[in-house]
Image (spheres, helix red, strand yellow):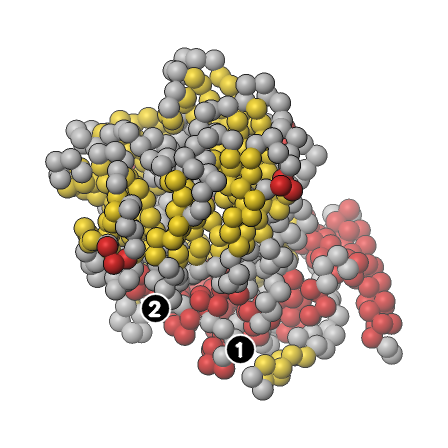
């Protein structure tokens, strides 16, 4: 039989399977249904002399009717298998929604004569962007109602949101597919009318020059990499926009920032390990960007401005970063002067500069700290926090000439609280604690515990549970991990998590190597040829929780998304016996095929994270842990896999191919469900209610598999 005929017959088989599943759903049958079967069509690739067979390579054909039919059949199967939980899903959704204040308003942030804020309205999916002039008692001006922009779309996300320095024009960009390609618009804030020009295919960056007529923006190449910087003059055709910079090296992204002092525009050329920064006087938009220091392999530096100085945070000879200054007139590295030295035990994560103060965000032993230096009297101190395990975010600091630092504080048990901190008097003012309806924080308890890895490293875990929890091995446990890119998963608050805690779960965030929780050394020990430390650390933490009777193997749920989905895929191949349920959201699991294909968005930029598989050493190492390549005939945990059809970061076919291969090989009767969002990307649904429904679906799956009462 020809391959063509096989594909035609298989296409019909998938179609009929989908029909039978849909019929089962409509008849409310019990979940005893045969899953879709993806046809295995051999496809071979040879790299470094090694031949790999990929039977599900055909699922990469985006838009092919057979591929679409397969994804829809999997969705129908998932719906049928979860049909009996629909009442539970609705109950959980109402529970999640019932905790939030649906009509609410963020704390206004002052900039110049205006107070900017967002608010939400009950029943509406998206935020409304507003401002008031002069005082908070002034009439409200709605700048952007995302609910109106989203009409007719299943998805809507804002990237650029920038008001011109003269406060008269709003530049904003929207994505209505989840592809992370944005259309850029301009709105006259005096009349409410739109300017005629629309600029397609833009990325996240957009900054105004000080003339309030010139906006710099970035565009994407075919691989979804921010590649070019353009200069647009308001009221002119985008076709006339000047191309300011093109980055030819596919390892680098192009980004743009404006200093809080509003004096300079900073052009960032950034790979995973290397940066180069160019600067332009924001009063001279037609000028030429100048290089501060040419890029040097594996040297990162980040720039801010105050007075006649650039402040430069760099890791050159300082793995955890040090802080330097240099004159704006002579910014080259030869003129840099150290003001805060490198420390092995303390990482400088970021800085904020104000007219009279330098704020340093540090990380020590896995916890974040705020250090403040008064640049006038040289006073140097740390902000005190009330809990031993906590986190904060620094946002809403729009002004340069201020003594007030705004930050949002939270912990595993403390809801988000916005503070204004006087950097002179050290007094803090609570501006708002976000309401969580029905929540009593005194009923919950958090702790930090450590598991010892085989090489002696102490792996931190942030743990939260409802008081009265007993370590007897009977409690269900939700174990979450990420462990890549040096990203820190700190002990944040989530009102959704309460639905687990109130049902007796212990919730654990593991701070495994590959993340940045314990500094840059921690990251380096979990990347490239050290990547397996990430997976082994996770397994070590799971074993610790079982041995210490926080939970047991048959009560343990594990979860991770994106690169965290790689983690989940790897550990269930390594130790399928250790976990009962696994959730892999938009998982990066087809490591070899993706990293060998430079046509896939973002692949080449990832070489510095995973390695270049064209190099035999990296090829062999990556192949040894790639989840898709290591699927075998074994009993896997019950597994919920999600995908986004328009996802540019993890292509939909990675979770789809993984699901197909798992179906063909796995033993036992554990559940395997694939749920593809056919109208979204990497982050899932953009509307807040749609997002809560996705959370409710996942919870219903977990509760059903563990037989937890809803």
Q: Residue reaching furthest front?
A: 287
Q: Nearer the viewer, mark 2 or mark 1?
A: 1
* Horizontal and vertical percent position of residue 520: 31, 61
* Residue bearing mark 1: 614
Q: Residues within 10 Å of mark 2 (few under 14, many from 20)?
A: some
Q: Is residue 543 above or below residue 77?
A: below
Q: Nearer the viewer, residue 249 or 343?
A: 249
* Residue bearing mark 2: 525
* Horizontal and vertical percent position of residue 529: 41, 74
Q: Please indicate, yes or no, whether residue 162 appears anywhere in the rendered image.
A: yes
Q: Which structural element holds mark 1? A: loop
Number of numbered callouts drawn: 2
Separation (CA) of disc 2 from disc 1: 22 Å
Q: Nearer the viewer, residue 557 or 483?
A: 483
Is 432 on the left or on the right of 348, as rendered? Answer: right
- The residue that appears at 38% across and 15% down in the rendered structure is 135
* Horizontal and vertical percent position of residue 644: 62, 52
């Amino acid at each position: 039989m020809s391959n063509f005929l096989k594909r035609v017959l298989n296409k019909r088989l998938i179609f009929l399977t989908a029909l039978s599943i849909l019929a089962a759903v409509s008849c409310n049958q019990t979940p005893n249904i045969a899953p879709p079967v993806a046809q295995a069509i051999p496809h071979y690739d040879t790299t470094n002399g090694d031949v790999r067979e990929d039977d599900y390579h055909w699922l990469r054909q985006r838009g092919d009717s057979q591929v679409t039919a397969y994804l829809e059949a999997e969705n129908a199967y998932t719906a049928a298998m979860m049909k009996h939980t629909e009442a539970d899903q609705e109950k959980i959704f109402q529970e999640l929604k019932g905790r939030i204040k649906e009509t609410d308003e963020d704390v206004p942030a002052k900039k110049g004569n205006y107070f900017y804020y967002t608010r939400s309205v009950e029943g509406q999916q998206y935020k409304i962007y507003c401002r008031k002039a002069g005082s908070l008692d002034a009439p409200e001006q709605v700048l952007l109602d995302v609910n109106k922009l989203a009409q007719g779309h299943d998805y809507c996300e804002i990237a650029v949101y920038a008001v011109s320095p003269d406060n008269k024009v709003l530049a904003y960009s929207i994505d209505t597919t989840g592809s992370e390609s944005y259309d850029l618009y301009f709105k006259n804030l005096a009349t409410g009318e739109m300017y005629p020009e629309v600029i397609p295919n833009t990325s996240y960056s957009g900054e105004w020059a000080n003339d309030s007529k010139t906006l710099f923006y970035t565009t994407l190449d075919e691989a979804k990499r921010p590649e070019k910087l353009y200069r647009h003059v308001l009221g002119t055709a985008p076709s006339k926009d000047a191309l300011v910079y093109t980055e030819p090296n596919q390892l680098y992204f192009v980004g743009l920032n404006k200093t809080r002092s509003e004096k300079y525009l900073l052009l960032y050329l950034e790979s995973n390990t290397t940066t180069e920064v160019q600067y332009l006087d924001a009063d001279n938009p037609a000028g030429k960007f100048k290089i501060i220091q040419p890029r040097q392999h594996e040297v990162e530096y980040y720039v801010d401005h105050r007075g006649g100085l650039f402040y430069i945070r760099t890791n050159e000879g300082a793995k955890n970063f040090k802080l330097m200054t240099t004159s704006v007139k002579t910014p080259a590295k030869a003129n840099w002067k150290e003001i805060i030295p490198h420390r092995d035990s303390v990482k400088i994560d970021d800085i904020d500069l104000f007219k009279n103060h330098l704020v340093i965000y540090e990380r020590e032993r896995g916890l974040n700290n705020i250090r403040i230096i008064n640049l006038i009297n040289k006073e140097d101190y740390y902000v005190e926090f009330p809990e031993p395990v906590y986190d904060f975010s620094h946002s809403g600091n729009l002004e340069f000439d201020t003594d007030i630092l705004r930050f949002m504080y939270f912990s595993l048990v403390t809801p988000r609280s916005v503070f204004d901190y006087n950097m002179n008097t050290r007094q803090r003012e609570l501006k708002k604690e976000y309401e969580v309806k029905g929540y009593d924080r005194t009923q919950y308890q958090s702790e930090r515990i450590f598991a010892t890895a085989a090489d002696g490293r102490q792996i931190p875990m942030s743990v939260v549970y409802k008081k009265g929890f007993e370590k007897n091995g009977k409690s269900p446990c939700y174990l979450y991990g990420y462990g890549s890119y040096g990203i820190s998963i700190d002990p944040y608050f989530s009102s959704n998590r309460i639905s687990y805690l109130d049902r007796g779960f212990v919730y654990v965030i593991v701070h495994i190597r590959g993340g940045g929780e314990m500094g840059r050394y921690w990251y380096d020990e979990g990347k490239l040829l050290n990547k397996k430390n990430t997976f082994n650390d996770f397994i070590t933490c799971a074993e610790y929780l079982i041995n210490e009777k926080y939970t047991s193997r048959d009560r343990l749920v594990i979860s991770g998304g994106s690169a965290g989905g790689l983690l989940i895929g790897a550990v269930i191949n390594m130790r399928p016996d250790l976990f009962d349920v696994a959730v892999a959201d938009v998982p990066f699991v087809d490591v070899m095929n993706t990293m060998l294909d430079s046509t896939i968005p973002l692949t080449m930029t990832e070489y510095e994270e995973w390695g270049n598989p064209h190099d035999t050493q990296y090829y062999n190492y990556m192949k040894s842990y790639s989840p898709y390549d290591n699927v075998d005939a074994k009993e896997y945990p019950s597994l919920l896999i999600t995908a986004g059809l328009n996802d540019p970061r993890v292509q939909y076919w990675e979770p789809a191919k993984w699901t197909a291969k798992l179906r063909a090989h796995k033993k036992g009767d554990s559940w395997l469900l694939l749920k593809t969002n056919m109208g979204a990307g990497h982050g899932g649904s953009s509307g807040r209610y749609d997002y809560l429904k996705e959370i409710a679906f996942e919870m219903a799956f977990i509760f059903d598999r563990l037989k937890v009462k809803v």
